[in-house]
Amino acid sequence: MIKDSYKIKYFKELNSLRFLGFLGIFFGHIFFSENLEIINHDLYSLAFRYGKILGFISLDSFFVLSSFLITWRALEEFHISGKFQLKHFLIRRSLRIWPLYFLIVFLGFFIEYIGAHYNQEITTLPSFWSFFLFILNYDMIINGYEFLFFMVFLWSISVEEQFYIFWSIILKWFQKYLLMISIILVIVSLVFRYYFINDSLNLNFNTISTLGNFGIGAIIAIDAFQKNKLFKWVKDLSKTKIIVTYLVMVMVYLIMPQLMEYDFFIIIQRLLFSIFFSFIILEQSYCEHSFFKFSKIKPFNFFGKISYGLYCYHGIVITIILHLKSNFNDSLFSSLLLFPIIIFSFTLTISYFSFKYYESKFLKLKSKFSLSN
């Protein structure tokens, strides 16, 4: 295949999906109150319960999305050049993740140092090596996560980095077995979740528990790239069937508090929602009869581009608000509406300037290691 005869696909829909994934995570973190009257209010209790559920499953959507996209790009690279450039892949990932990640890490340790210097009560952070080596999730499994709030969020980046390294090795030397390995990842994650059914820390934070998310993302990338049966089935779905599928997803989400009482559902939860997210990716990217494309909401496209910053910075803004919260009157209105709006507005502003004046400087360097070079 001549290089110029293949047009590299740009998934414009994925930016909107990234932003929607962030919104889910945002709602999982945004409801906090120490006022028992507010906590016991039915409306707050409902928002808090479903926010937590939405936060966890939305984080899984990023794992599926990451796996789908890097697998697709690798398949394109094989298709165009017949090889996978491991070094270039790792450099591209590092340029996207590391600058903001280590800025947040530096800020966290700086706050810890300042707190100790001025005798402020700040819970000791995990070892710097847990952050530097991207193994924070395992530190949290062993030691818990009662430390600086916005630093806790970095556990998911550790998981992603671990997967990137593992998957790059697979893509480099075991590409022929990509589909089989992806299926094995799903099976391994299910077995792991069965074995650790009563260990919430391992269920939530262990990389092995998330392998099903990554495996499903890779499977749909392979299927879509090869235009196999599943891809064609989704592509040709009628508008009615698409709407029904989304309604089923919403229904499962609404009855999750009841479903979580069953061990079987806890075991398959991540797999089930990975399948749901995979459907959304394929439906939004390829389906000819979609009832709505989220990419039509133009702000969503930009918000998706800065979603990594939104994820990293919203924890910092929440931490600041928590620190200042005692200066404000705590009410149901402020807990459910005012604080979320303030936090989202500040997070959006900070993320915009971070992307424009900091992250973009590194992102421009990615082109030197892109598929076109």
Image (cartoon, rainbow, N blue to C red):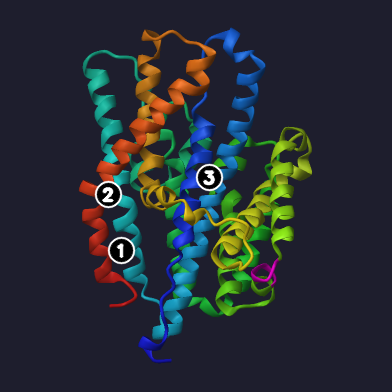
Secondary structure that dominates the magenta span: helix
The answer for how far apart the CA atoms under marks 2 and 3 are is: 21 Å
Categorize mark 1 by other alpha carbons within 10 Å: few (<14), some (14-19), many (20+).
Answer: some
Q: Which residue is mark 1?
A: 91
Magenta-tinted stretch? 233-237
Residue located beneath label 3 in the image: 59
Q: Give the residue type at disc 1.
A: Ile
Residue 99 numbered tag: 2
Report the residue at 70% width, 71% height from top: 233
Instruction: Find the distance from the CA under tag 1 to the CA under tag 2.
Output: 12 Å
The residue nearer to you, when weighing 153 against 293, is 293
Q: Amino acid at mark 3?
A: Leu
The amino acid at mark 2 is: Pro
Question: Residue 341's image quarter?
Answer: top left
Nearer to us: label 1 or label 3: 3
Q: Position of residue 160 (x, y in %)?
A: 46, 53
Q: Residue at x 61, y 73 (%)?
A: 223
Q: Disc 3 on helix, strand or loop?
A: helix
Q: Tell me the element at label 1.
A: helix
